[in-house]
Image (cartoon, rainbow, N blue to C red):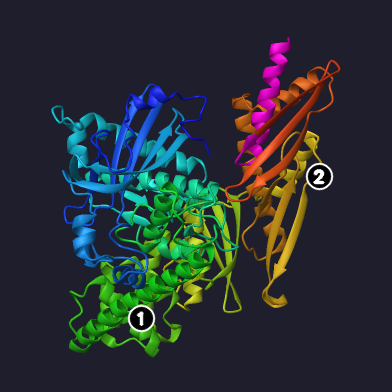
Amino acid sequence: MLNWRHDRHLTASSVESTHSLIGQGSTVTSPLFVTIDSQKTLDIDDAISITQSGDLYIISVAIADPSAKVGVGSHDDKVAFERAASIYARDRAVQTMLPRHIGADQSSLVAGQPRQAMVFTITLNSSLEVVGFEPSSQVITVNTRLTYEAIPEIARGTQNPLREMVELLSRVSTLLLQRRRSKGALALFDIRKLMLSDEEGNLRQYESLDQMVGHIIVQEFMILTNSQIALFMAENGLPAVYRNHASRVSAPHALDLANTVEQWLKEGLVTASSVGAQLGALIERAVYDGVARGHYGLGLTLYLHGTSPLRRYADLVNIRQIRAYLDNCPLPYSQADLLTISASINKTLRERSESTVDYHKEVLARKAQRLVASGNLANMEDNVLSAAVKLAKDAGHLPEAVAAELIRRLNNNTIADAIVDRLAIQIPKEAITEDLGAAFSNWMCQHPHNVVRIIMNGIQTQVFEGLDETVHGVNGGFKCVVAVSASGRRLQGVGVHREKRVAKQKAMVEILCRHLSLPTNSLSPEAPTQTSSSPATRATDYKGALIELCRKQGWAAPHLHVAMSGPSNAASFTATATVHPKGSDVESATSPECATKKAAEAAASAILLKRLAKSREATSVSSSNPVVQLNEMAQKNRLAEPSYVFTQLSIAPPQFECEARIVVDGNVLSAKTVAGGKKVAKELAAAEILGQVKIAS
């Protein structure tokens, strides 16, 4: 971790010209702090300031510090511990974690009022890499309170004195979001559709662009601050409450998942509201822990919460630890304490979430029962009708009024996705009447893209498994054969169309109709009028292509390992393909579960080919990789290949030392570098040796 006071790239004067670091008990009037919250927010945790000095961005994030007003073990502290976090309904606090006179008044960062705060000064270079981080305990005064909606108006204005800073906040936060995504985070955002995901990948749709811009600013600077606090605490040996986010074994890399979800959204296979169910099948719920286990959604080894101590107990604990460290006082919590605290917070939040869900389900169920009994369903809200369908699922039959309303909405094309999903996947086949089945079948033929979404949902929830797909070219179009397994049955659908995408959709429609025992006579294949005389187009032989690539590159043949799971009569297969390119690290890719060994090998090979293509493209576009340059220099001058020796210096945060050596003209050139990952340390060491070679020449 670099500290700006010791970073050779920075000077004290370059930072102090824009920031005055004032000791504890003083009031900071510079930097210029602003808060960004909802108009109804009373417990204001955070304030932000940003300035630019040459190629550097100097960011100050002030976090409310109620630790002096809420002592460890006090009555208020015990209540806060039991509540774990404030409870909100929309943007209004229903139950605050801290007493209102503290959380909403004495410790809240109210504009114009001096407040005790933890100030985290973060310096970014032009590539948005953190080159300086300094925590301090200070008294600050917020200059201006802003709402989310006010941000774009200020940025567009010409007279507002905050315009320049707000513009910079907006620009840098957007770049931080894009950088997180490029670095492998599960970061989803679509400005046109007003969608943005949080740190765990949960997607939210905003009402306006104005509202979304403000949320991006707050979210990105808080994620940046929390990640740096985690590094600081780990580096200085401070026990902390970490925020861990795990993926399931079947989950792909977070960046691959983000790309997949974006493609689903683009093709209309999922909506912002239904993405959660898709992700829930692949990733776990984030939890607190006294041990850092990594954060899948952010792609970080270390992460924690420390920016909302008025609203979350984990944040309050972490702020207390840092405050004690800066004040040279004994730490209030041990590692064992934090393990207990984390477990309690998780239990409280989990039970609260479950009880909230159960409460809402009960309310919807009662309303659904009342309306079904009255027979008046025409104006029933979608979520209530969905609850009525669930009641029918539990009862094993659909009331006539519910079936009639479903038929009406199917015929009018006004049925919601969630209701269709429940009807297709959860309702027993026996409960679907002949009239409802006919209406549903007709709807599927008119909306085949939605059927693809339904089946993909079914695969994620394991209603369907073993998806297999083959495409053949026929005269003037395509023939797609798709097969899945469900309840021990192998279901197959065939679609023919001039567009491959539509052919696949039609095949999916036939599969779902067969699964639900619905009529398929409304399917119109639009088959070509002539029989193709040309040979059918075969599916790409990805395994063969991978073997051929290794042969051409002079690499060892790829290694393919296949694992089988499930009973022998309904087995599924997962394959891992591995290659070792010369001069590079081993590359591997794992397939999703497939119905056959051949399909699994093909899927793993396809994923690995794509990954290798990107790697080769990056190498051909840019020759700036010092490891590659050093290898090329050695080959060109007929020298022995450079050697690299790694030593792991620490686990949390991970620190690796790389010692690189190469013999040039009888002289041993060596370099030792330290970085957070082996790859970066290796590149730094190679770059240092290249510099030595240039100086010698």
Q: Mark 1: which amino acid?
A: Lys
Relative depth, front residue between 529 and 331: 331
Relative depth, front residue between 178 and 30: 30
Extreme-front residue of the structure: 329
Extreme-right residue of the structure: 666
Q: Quadrant of residue 405?
A: bottom left
Identify the disc placed on residue 390: 1
5 w.r.t. 270: above or below: above
Give, as a single range, the part of the protein colored magenta: 674-697
Q: Is residue 499 visible?
A: no
298 w.r.t. 335: above or below: above
The stretch drawn in magenta includes residue 695: yes
Instruction: Say what secondary structure mark 1 lies in.
Output: helix
Relative depth, front residue between 4 and 327: 327
Q: Mark 2: which amino acid?
A: Ala
Measured from the top left, where is residue 207 in percent x and y? Answer: 23, 52
Instruction: Say what secondary structure mark 2 lies in.
Output: loop
Q: Is residue 551 left or right of residue 132?
A: right
At x 35% / y 36%, what residue is drawn?
A: 59
Identify the disc placed on residue 557: 2
Nearer the N terminus, badge 1 or badge 2? Answer: 1
At x 58% / y 69%, what residue is drawn?
A: 465
Measured from the top left, where is residue 57 in percent x and y? Answer: 38, 30
Q: Is residue 351 visible?
A: yes
The stretch drawn in magenta includes residue 597: no
55 w.r.t. 112: above or below: above
Measured from the top left, where is residue 356 in percent x and y? Answer: 32, 75
The 10 Å Cα crowd at callout 2, few under 14, some 14 to 19, many 20 or more, is: some
456 w.r.t. 429: above or below: above
